[in-house]
């Protein structure tokens, strides 16, 4: 039976298949049939790469039916086709990651620093206006601070006054006064005994705006009692010829709070002493003073032979030690120590209107330099006693000292 289509013979079929017969017809071209888009390259025959219309989409699939184009090898196992290693992941760019991390860290530090600055600036009590001081000396080289410890009991409870042995006197007076100078030849710290006999010059009242005549000879701490920081600054400038650039004041409670916030201050006390008035009761030797003990230490005067002069020496020694401890990396770099310290200090300080956190930090670093052997610590040069048990300044030495400070020269003058 002839099974070939009508008009075809076995020879015709062989020719159509490319046979070598003499009557072979050329191969016929099948008409183009548009292929429907495949759905993910998988057909309904079990995922062999055929579309819905049954035509292969040209991709090569592994044994599990996934295409090489999708990152799989023809063996159906690994991305490389050599043994089941999965997707090939790029090596991490550590340089880029480290750079990005450093940038983020710098931005965070910058934002934190700016926020801390404005927070600190907002807490400072800028109550002193040095622009009200009249007839001021010319500016010299470097920066000069007038640092005052007052006996203010402002905001203290009766229990706190008892604990700190401050008494309950109304108002406030200067308990200690120092000049701190920062210059190119190292820092200079000069104590001004509160019993110094000076001239209180004419001045304009800081509150009233009225003009007052010169009072003449008086103890230095009387200037503060008469018209506060502005007249005290005016009196120091008039008697020394040294211009005061910044004013910083702290009261009893604030001083004790700062010492407690820093964790106490280590001191080496050479000789035991007691003072009922200040509450001091110290044994000789190295020891750490808390806020109450520190306040007693710097206030004691009646236990010493030279009273106010020996007290000023202790004040210098303690403040330098406090600044040295507060400026250590363990304090500055530890936010759990730094922020309580800043909070305690800033809340209790009274400064001039031009004083900011940055300048305040420079003052503390300058104070630290006094203990580091970079500068000079001294009392104002004295020339003996004066009326009312006061102390007279050695004016030729004072003039020489001020000249050296104004010209930013090495200080060679010696004080008591």
Image (tube, rainbow, N blue to C red):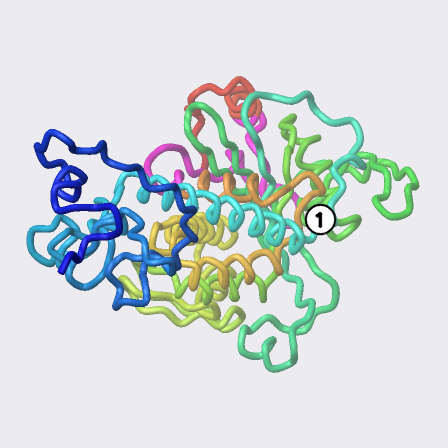
> What is the x, y in percent for residue 303?
45, 63
Mark 1 lies on residue: 126
- Label 1: few (<14), some or many (≥20) within 10 Å? some
**395 inside magenta stretch:** yes
Q: On the rendered image, what quadrant is the C terminus found in? A: top left
Q: Is residue 301 visible?
A: no
Q: Is residue 123 left or right of residue 190?
A: right
> What is the x, y in percent for residue 179?
55, 38
Residue drawn where x is 58% and y is 79% of the image: 162
Question: Which residue is the extreme one toward the bottom?
Answer: 159
Question: Which residue is the extreme one toward the front?
Answer: 1
Please tell me which residue lies in front, 129 or 379: 129
Please tell me which residue lies in front, 19 or 314: 19
Q: Give the vertical position of 140 relative to 252 (above or below).
A: above
Residue drawn where x is 50% and y is 20% of the image: 408
Please tell me which residue lies in front, 104 or 113: 104
Find the magenta span and give its range. Answer: 369-398
């Amino acid at each position: 039976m002839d099974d070939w289509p009508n008009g075809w013979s076995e020879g015709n079929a062989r020719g159509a298949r490319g046979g070598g017969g003499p009557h072979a017809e050329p191969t016929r071209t099948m008409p183009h049939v548009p292929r429907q888009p495949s759905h993910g390259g998988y057909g309904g025959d079990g995922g062999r790469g055929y579309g819905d219309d049954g035509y292969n989409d040209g991709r090569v699939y592994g044994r599990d039916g996934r295409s090489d184009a999708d990152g799989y090898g023809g063996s159906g196992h690994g991305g490389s086709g050599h043994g089941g290693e999965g997707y090939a992941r790029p090596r991490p760019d550590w340089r880029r990651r480290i750079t990005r991390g450093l940038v983020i860290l710098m931005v965070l530090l910058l934002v934190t620093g700016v926020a801390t600055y404005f927070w600190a600036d907002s807490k400072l009590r800028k109550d002193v206006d040095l622009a009200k001081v009249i007839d001021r000396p010319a500016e010299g080289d470097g920066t000069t601070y007038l640092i005052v410890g007052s006996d203010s009991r402002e905001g203290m409870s009766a229990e706190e006054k008892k604990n700190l042995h401050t008494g309950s006197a109304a108002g406030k007076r200067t308990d200690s006064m120092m000049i701190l100078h920062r210059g190119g030849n190292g820092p200079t710290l000069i104590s001004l005994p509160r019993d110094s006999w000076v001239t209180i010059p004419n001045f304009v009242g800081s509150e009233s705006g009225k003009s007052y005549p010169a009072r003449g000879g008086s103890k230095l701490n009387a200037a503060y009692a008469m018209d506060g920081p502005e007249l005290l600054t005016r009196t120091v400038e008039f008697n020394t010829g040294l211009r005061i650039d910044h004013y910083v004041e702290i009261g009893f409670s604030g001083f004790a709070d700062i010492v407690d916030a820093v964790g106490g201050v280590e001191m080496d006390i050479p000789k035991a002493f007691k003072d009922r008035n200040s509450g001091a009761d110290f044994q000789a030797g190295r020891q750490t003073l808390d806020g109450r003990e520190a306040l007693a230490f710097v206030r004691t005067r009646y236990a010493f032979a030279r009273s106010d002069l020996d007290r000023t020496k202790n004040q210098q020694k303690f403040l330098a030690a406090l600044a040295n401890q507060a400026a250590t990396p363990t304090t500055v770099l530890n936010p759990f120590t730094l922020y309580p310290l800043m909070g305690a200090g800033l809340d209790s300080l009274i400064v001039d209107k031009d004083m900011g956190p940055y300048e305040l930090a420079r003052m503390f670093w300058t104070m630290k330099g006094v203990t580091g052997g970079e500068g000079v610590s001294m009392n104002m040069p004295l020339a003996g006693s004066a009326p009312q048990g006061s102390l007279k300044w050695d004016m030729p030495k004072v003039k020489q000292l001020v000249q050296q400070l104004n010209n930013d020269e090495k200080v060679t003058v010696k004080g008591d």
